[in-house]
Image (cartoon, helix red, strand yellow):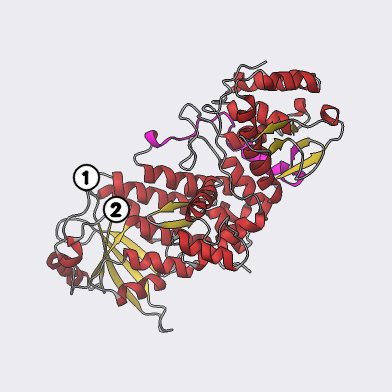
Amino acid sequence: MIKLNRTKQNKWILQKNINSKDLFKSFIYVMDKQGNNIDSKKLKSSLRSINRYVGRSAEGSDSTMGVRLSQMCFYMVGYKKGGMFLPSPVTQLYIKKKLPTKKLFLINLFSMQFPSPYSKTPENFNIFFGRLILKLLTDARIDKRLYIDECFWFLPFIEQINNSVYEELINSILEYRKLNYAAKLKLFMSIPDSEDLFSNCVHEMNYYFLRIFKEFGVLNITEDKSHNAGKLFKFRHGNTATFRTDAWDSNKLNSGYVEINSDLFTDVEKLFAEFSAFDKPSTQSESLSKEDWIRDLYEFNILDYINVVSEYSKSKNYIIEVIKEMLYASKYGSRDGTTFQNKLKPFFELFSEINSVEIIGGSGDTDLLCVVSDTSNYQNKYYKINVDAKTSKNRTAQLNPIRLTKHLSKNGSKYCIVVSPKFCKGVRDDINGFKIVTIDAEVLANYCLKDCLDSEENLANYSFLNQIIMENLGCDISKILDKQIDTKFKLSID
């Protein structure tokens, strides 16, 4: 049987606080109501007002809200950035009811990995653990099912997976199934501190992880009265009188097995046709920054999976690639800025009202000249805008507004947008009183991505952005647009 290091210090750590679909939904609803700002006290109060939180005391615990938020991130519902909770594309589609819930949360399961930004699982675990579970549940050799006791005897201790380890695991599961209850119990008890270890594993795996994906229709959990002769494994939880068991549901007397919802089998096969369970997950150290790593995990990678299982989003592939390349070029493009300029051209072409984008460049002119349809009237009028790309290995420290204004006059443009990965505070003073706005590349990308994904035409609305610019000339509009994104793409729940 496969040799695994089974200790409490060497296992998957699966976030646990809530295991109800309704509580997940309530959390998303309340976060939306508070503008996705992370405010534990307000979150606690709002959940209490809709009877979705009952604390152990009259005051309740703010730390519980932090745990709940972390669990939402762990289950790929969204991620934290700059005091905000940013919903993932799956969550946006879930709320807008664009795709079936079970299909969307299948994507979440498929995307789950260690390392995770929201799990303290040890660093030696490097595995797409969601994919491993799904692959096992499609393997006919084990009847496309896992019994609950198999889930916590084997799975939490798999550190890495490849074809060889996988085959050994399958053979070990088959060997384990030949054992009777007493022999299995002897195995459990042979592990040091088995009560403490397996009560924790059972609690995380059976009471939370499996039931969460059952609630969302990804997995089925079926009772099997004959399994282990109808006996349950019971492990004392700490020094309490509470025992954690492998019962198939709350307060049940028998165990059972886990299967994939048959409606999702085709989708699982499609995902494995494109991505392997043996792929190595990305790590923060391999990414250029933690911010890039998290964005890839929660935005772009998930969009790749959505594209595999949904005709709805396959048309979005080009959009996603254009936005990804623009963001990368803004941070890591050539020092002379030409790479960033070249990637901004197809990016601005994603706006429906922008008729043409011309790369001009050179020291005496703007980087890009855009011709925009004026949709404020029906006279087919047009106006021009300048776009200047500022890429640097550090923050953009200063601008020359006089030079940018000369470029406006030269091209007869309405205003200039300066796009950069990051601006220093002093830049705001540089452009005060001029027909210039600055914007962080990531904020601009976020708006364009969300609006394109929300649009039937797969194009973003420039008129919305133009209005913000006209009301805030001479300013950095990054935070203003960020707030407007929350309003425009409000995750309203019926």
In the rendered image, residue 446, in percent from the top left (x then y), is placed at 42, 58
Point out the stretch of residues depicted in magenta.
Answer: 258-285
Viewer-proximal residue, 476 or 223? 223
Circle nearer the N terminus (2, 1):
1
Q: Amino acid at mark 1?
A: Arg
Q: Amino acid at mark 2?
A: Pro
Q: Residue at x 43, y 66 (%)?
A: 485
* Residue 443 forms part of the magenta stretch: no
Q: Which mark is residue 335?
A: 1
Query: Which one is in front in this view, the residue at disc 2 or the one at disc 1?
Result: 2
Residue 126 in the image, given as x and y percentages of width and height: 50, 29
Q: Is residue 182 above or below residue 92?
A: above
Q: Residues within 10 Å of mark 1 (few under 14, many from 20)?
A: few
Which part of the image, by quadrant, shows the N terminus?
top right
> For residue 104, which numbered disc appears in the image?
none
Q: Residue at x 75, y 45 (%)?
A: 250
Residue topped by disc 2: 421
